[in-house]
Image (tube, rainbow, N blue to C red):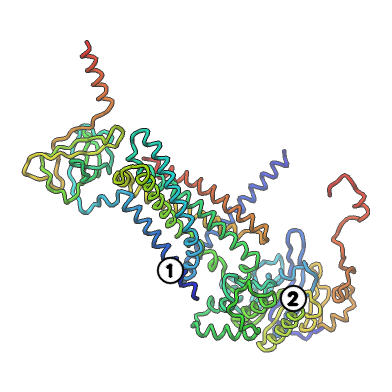
Amino acid sequence: MDNSVSPQNNLVSVQNLSFSRGNKKIFDDISLEFERGKITAIMGPSGTGKTTLLKLIGGQLFPEQGTIIVDGNNVHRLRRSELYDLRKRMGMLFQSGALLTDMSVFDNVAFPLREHTHLPESMIRTLVLMKLQAVGLRGARNLMPNELSGGMARRIALARAIALDPMMIMYDEPFTGQDPISKGALVHLIKSLNTILGLTSIMVSHDVQETAAIADYIYVISEGKIVGQGTPKEIEQSDSDWVQQFMTGAADGPAHFHYPAKDYVDDLLSTGRRY
Amino acid sequence: MIELLQQLGKNTRTGFTKLGRGTFFLLQTIAGILSVLPRPRLLLNQMYSVGVLSFLIITISGLFVGMVLGLQGYYILSDFGAEETLGVMVAASLVRELGPVVSALLFAGRAGSALTAEIGLMKATEQLSGMEMMAVDPIKRIISPRFLAGLLSMPLLAALFSAVGIIGGQMVGSGMLGVDEGAYWSQMQANLDFQDDIVNGVIKSIVFGFVASWIALFEGYDAIPTSEGVSRATTRTVVNSAFSILGLDFILTALMFGDN
Amino acid sequence: MQHTNTQDTLVGLFVASGIAGLFFLALQVSNLSSFTEHDSYTVTARFENSGGLKVKSPVSSAGVKIGQVSSITFDPKTYESVVKLSIDKQYNTLPDDTTASVFTAGLLGEQYVNLEAGGSEEYLKDGGKIEITQSAIILEKAIGQFLFKSAEEKK
């Protein structure tokens, strides 16, 4: 474990966070630190509320308990205008890309620039082409979002997320549903953007290999608790059964294959009731 | 029995909660109009999809409704030898009632359902959420321009509906059935009042445009972000708009024409 | 950006036709065009009974509409109905001995004020008075009188 991290070096700090949806406790008093300029990954099976965590950091959801500090600001204590100013410095890459379907690729990337700056159109054009070049899709600028493949849409969304030169980017499942080539392209892109632009990256993922390849630090979450944390190497060598199951992809283990139910034989033999 | 009452209580409570959310949403939307004004391009794009795309259905329906009124009115009025007042009948029913009401119902079906589906799908595909994370308020950027466009388009559409209908009634009345054309127009002019009839009709259509746009946008914004949720929200838009328009029409009519 | 141009044109056409529709309703369908305040003058006529006359009922002469009723009040001293008529400025040559009567257009039609010109050389001015008036014919009264008369004749 890397204990040399001083708090000042952390761009985002999640302290004693609890959050539940309905009766299900999604986070149970967890604390996470995200170091500046590093790629920190949060891993865990689907449905553990990883996307929820990103929305909490972005101030779209309110926690039941705990605080989230982003660049010295308590996200949920900010006034609305302050929160919006903070968000201008945060990029977020949604799983679906979340491109605006009624405008072209070019206009999508130009969208944050046009909304938040009064730059002349010629300068916006230069900036947009630079961002598109960075993700390798300058040639696709006139396409509409419905003409893009999933991987292309995600890269365009990434170009849009870095349009305002943010201090950090949150990636929501960047590799899910991608073919190996697109995955490779995204891994390369995330890594190089992080080094070139000096971004801080928070990545939520359950793709073990890709994440382990680029992350500097990994948290593994299950059932609202942190079950393992460390550098990719430390995680691989973890002696926690749970982490091992997740990293190797075994079907059964501490995380059960079956959704909680009553005894199988009893269930089959009980008749006369519909449920 | 107790279960039934519990269910009723629960439904009432969800109903009030939704009304509360809707009111809050409406206030935000109205406040957001201020930020639309310096950006007429946003409004223009929405005037296109809300107004221009409803133009055809409104004018064609208006023409047919006017023609039917001309025909039916003639049959009834000629029994009393009062065919000359056909213009009054056609114009009064269109300007006071049918113009605002029918065009608002068509508007809810054509533009309202499209708005709900659009907003609902934007929500389902995380576009609204994405906008928020880009520090762009989706209410100001997406909802308010559409609301304003609905509010401005509705009276124009209703006026078109009535105007085309009156011409349709004249085409049938004096073109086919032989009512004197001069009598058609002059009786109309003598009996319809600008303040009482035309202005009240326009006020009605503004109220209907307000309510229909509000319902359509809120149902979309409040939709459960799945394909089923969006399709249900679209249905609710049409049903709730129809109820609200007809109910409000009764209230407005009682207020406006009551003391005559 | 090509498509926005046609879109703008269509929105322009839509707004223009909507406003044209409103103007059509205002001018062609309603009575807005008939009379406006600034080019009319007012004269007063006192009727024993103004019947179903209303504000904005037409005022006509020889079958042509020349103005409208602007107010109807009751005079508690003379027990008369005081009707103010606003008449279009271009008809400023009505003699001051003009007769005003309340007529009904057709059997079921609305009531209007009919002005019948007299022979005087003096013209009615703004604020002038019409001295000779004939009250509204109340249908029930007329029928009653008719029945009464025919009963008497039969005797």
Using a 10 Å C-alpha cutoff, classify the residue at mark 1 as few (fewer than 14 neighbours), some (14 to 19) or many (20 or more): few
Which of the 4 image quadrants contains residue B173? top left
Tell me if residue A9 can be seen.
Answer: no
Counting labels gives 2
The image position of residue A176, as x and y in percent, is 75, 74
Q: Residue furthest bottom?
A: A196
> Is C25 displayed left or right of B218 in the figure?
left
- Label 2: which secondary element: loop
The image position of residue C3, as x and y in percent, is 49, 72
Q: Which residue lies furthest to the front in this view?
A: B176
Tag of residue C9:
1
Tag of residue C35:
none
The image position of residue A31, as x and y in percent, is 76, 74
Residue at x 47% of width, y 51% of height: B61
Using a 10 Å C-alpha cutoff, classify the residue at mark 2 as few (fewer than 14 neighbours), some (14 to 19) or many (20 or more): some
Q: Residue furthest left?
A: C121
Residue at x 41% of width, y 50% of height: B165
Return the residue at label 2: A178
Residue at x 47% of width, y 62% of height: B52
Q: Which of B212 and B79 is in front in this view?
A: B79
> Is A115 displayed left or right of A191 in the figure?
left
Q: Nearer the viewer, residue A57 or B129?
A: B129
- Label 1: which secondary element: helix
